Image (cartoon, grey):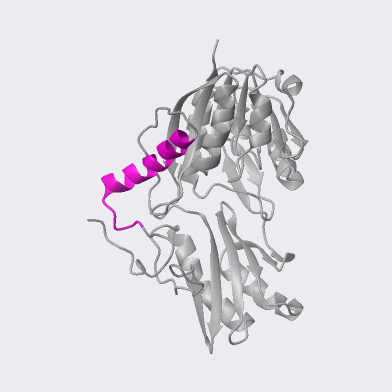
Amino acid sequence: MRELCRHFGTCGGCVFQNMSRDAYRAMKRDAIEKALALHGFEAPVATLVETLPATRRRATLRAVKNGDEVVIGFNALRSHAVVDMQECFVLTPALVSLVQDLRELLRRLLRSQAQAEIDVTETDSGFDLALALPARDFAHHTTVLAQWACAQAIARIFVNGELAVHLANPTIRIGDAEVRLPQGAFLQPSREGETILRQAVLEITKGARRVADLFAGCGTFTLVLAQHARVHAVDTDHEALRSLDEAARKTRGLKPVTTEARDLFTRPLRPDELAAFDAVVIDPPRAGARAQAQLLAQCRVGRLAYVSCNPETFARDAAILIKGGFHLTGVKPVDQFLWSKHIELVGAFVRKP
């Protein structure tokens, strides 16, 4: 039996850590198979691909100051109380270490009984932090924040949505490209999981000469697809697309990359626009992409890679695609949220002749 985190049973983050490996894998696959069955079809679901412990590079933490002490960590199981994190088997060691340093910073910034929320991402150029603190003037704390940031390899700090410290541009590497990460931009939880998803997408779209990457973000798939194909990246996030475009232009050896700022929920790509592409990659948020799936079902694109973090909305959209003439050839489950109920997946669709 695996070693359990000292917070197991109290912390709400890893509720299935004590399950046997076989039972855990079966639970994750069953979640996908049941979602497909609910919509009246089935498809081959591959063996679960698990990321390793201690690889998650981003987290949202909560903190509360009690007297002179700061408690910081995740919410307790079925509670809004905060579990004081002394170890974590999911986060990278550098992130766990940073939690201890954040205690000292928040002890200086917070009044007793005050609470804070921390979004933190470990990037290639340092930590990117967004602090949500009680409303007050933090201008006089700029020196404290800057000195602390220099000592802790922090690239950037936002406080209540305002840039407070900027020592370096937070960057991540995608393929051969170096991408500047906008504040609040979506990023896969782990580099390892991101690589697994990318490999699956590349396999599904192999040989395509023109690819549409929908909900592209900062280019998680775009900048690797562009090593082999012309790519049109679409997303509603202007800053993310700006970073993607900047990275594509600076990276040698890529095929042409174009970007388009567009809300795919209210204005999905039409069949006549999709006709220009050999393959489509779609990676929507948890709500899925019903409107876009309906128009994809009407187009003649031959191959489609659907990346999802929600089996229920994936199955709903897959049913639409299948009704429109696609065949779901397989689903690859990817476990980036270890010991939780969450699961990511990549579905491979091909249009029937």
Residue lying at the far top in this picture: please name it. Answer: 353
Q: Main secondary structure of the magenta part?
A: helix
From where the camera sits, is residue 316 visible?
Answer: yes
> In terms of depth relative to the viewer, which is nearer, 26 or 181?
26
Q: Is residue 297 above or below residue 125?
A: above
Q: Position of residue 134 (x, y in %)?
A: 68, 77
> In terms of depth relative to the viewer, which is nearer, 52 or 114?
114
Q: Position of residue 233 (x, y in %)?
A: 69, 33
Q: Position of residue 70 (x, y in %)?
A: 52, 80
From where the camera sits, is residue 213 visible?
Answer: no
Viewed as shown, does residue 146 lie left or right of 341? right
Q: Position of residue 21 (x, y in %)?
A: 28, 48
Q: Looking at the figure, which quarter contains the N terminus?
A: bottom left
Residue lying at the far left in this picture: please name it. Answer: 1
Q: Quadrant of residue 154?
A: bottom right
Viewed as shown, does residue 157 lie left or right of 350? right
Q: Looking at the figure, which quarter contains the C terminus?
A: top right
Which residue is found at the position 45% from the left and 45% from the top? Answer: 343
Q: Quadrant of residue 230?
A: top right
Which residue is found at the position 54% from the left and 46% from the top? Answer: 188
| Numbered label tally | 0
Q: Which residues are magenta?
A: 16-38
Q: Is residue 229 above or below residue 334?
A: above
On whether residue 40 falls in the magenta region, the answer is no
